Amino acid sequence: MSKKLCIIGCGLIGGYHLGHFLQRDKFGDFELAGFCDKVLAKAEAFAEKAGTGKAYTNFIDMYDEVQPDAVFICVPPTCHGIIEFETIKRNIPFFVEKPLALDMGLAKELVRQVEAKGLIAASGFQCRYDSINEAAKEYIKTHEIMHVCASRVGGIPDAEWWNVKFTSGGQLVEQTIHQMDMLRYLLDDEPDTVYSVATRGHITQEENPGYFTDDLSTTLITFKSGLTATMMTGCYSLDGASWDSKMTFGSRSSRMDYVLCSRVTTYGDIEEDKAAEVAGIIKGDGTQRKNENEVGVTTRTANDFGVDCDRTFLDAVISGDPSKIRSPYADAYKSVAFTIACNKSMETGLPVKVEY
């Protein structure tokens, strides 16, 4: 008998997961039984697309009637809390989209209750399931990383709540948390302190009415190992040529460019790609001389990591074994704490220690 699956939040990210579940060959052991959104028409549209399940505007009514075996919670950052507490009380395994919450006291209590119940719970850090991570981890394992220089630049998402830092957490917490999480995951290291500076004023009310968040922020991160990293993130972009979003891991004789959800390229490791040692340049004034045409070794994404992420969680629900989940709820909390510490640093103008 198939298990019953529900979705709370029938917007863009809810649709992302629904698209996965409609691949019946991969998710046929789960019945799409209920869809909940405060706007009934959105929930009804999901039910129509699925061809199964009932639409609701009250998730408690849905829980009472459907008695789900698992639920995906896909709501804006400020909507977390009541939904999770009720879900935990009913012992329903749940998958929640990042960030878990914007209030660290709330997030910590949710983690405590999940762990007290031994409940299977996960978060939507899908990038951890990308096939490129194997090559990236191997590079980091075999090279002494000196520094990581990371960035993410895009435009303003089409969501009203995203425009206000109080309701979204700002770009670093709501979007760039994926890169921050991947730094933790790839380096197998935890951030110790952060120092963040925000910039505003470039995006005007005339350009985007109701916009009250940072245009960009820059963060210096010190990890517990002593490694340092920088993260610049902005939502000011009007054209894809404005910035190359990636994370560069630099070692003493080579480097790795990690482009989220796309590819990993290493430079300087194979013989034909090694830089020429020219006196007065490498050992001189801070410039580097490399080959005119770098070769590089590229590994590209070869799997649908979003599907793999969702499938891994649901497999855990079926088996009762969560060991293969790469972003369990308690670990996702650490990535939220990481980014919330950055916001605190922006507010105070001081370095902030990341507290778990």
Image: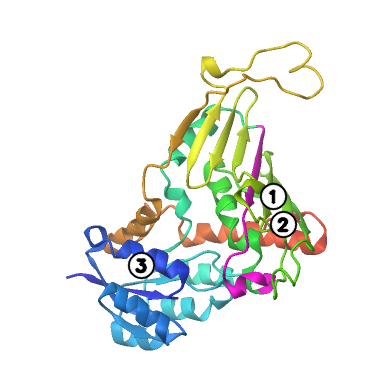
Given the current orientation, which residue lies at the most extreme left position? Answer: 1
Q: Please tell me the numbered disc located at residue 99.
A: none
N-term-proximal mark, 3 vs 2: 3
Return the residue at label 1: 232
Q: How crowded is mark 3: few (under 14 residues within 10 Å), some or many (20 or more)?
A: many
Kindly identify the amino acid type of the residue bearing the numbered disc 2: Leu
Percent position of residue 315, x then y: 30, 59
For residue 102, above or below residue 287: below
Tell me the CA gap for discs 2 and 1: 7 Å
Quadrant, the N terminus: bottom left
Q: Nearer the viewer, residue 355 or 24?
A: 24
N-term-proximal mark, 1 vs 3: 3
Kindly identify the amino acid type of the residue bearing the numbered disc 1: Met
Return the residue at label 2: 216
Kindly identify the amino acid type of the residue bearing the numbered disc 3: Leu
For residue 256, above or below residue 104: above
Local SS, label 2: strand
Return the residue at label 3: 18
Q: Is 169 situated left or right of 303 in this image?
A: right
Query: Which image quadrant is residue 105 in?
Result: bottom right
Quadrant, the C terminus: bottom right
Quick check: is 229 in the magenta stretch?
no
Tell me the CA gap for discs 3 and 2: 32 Å
Q: Which of 109 and 19 is in front in this view?
A: 19
Tell me the CA gap for discs 1 and 3: 32 Å
Do labels 2 and 1 touch, CB within 8 Å? yes
Provide the residue span drawn in magenta.
146-166
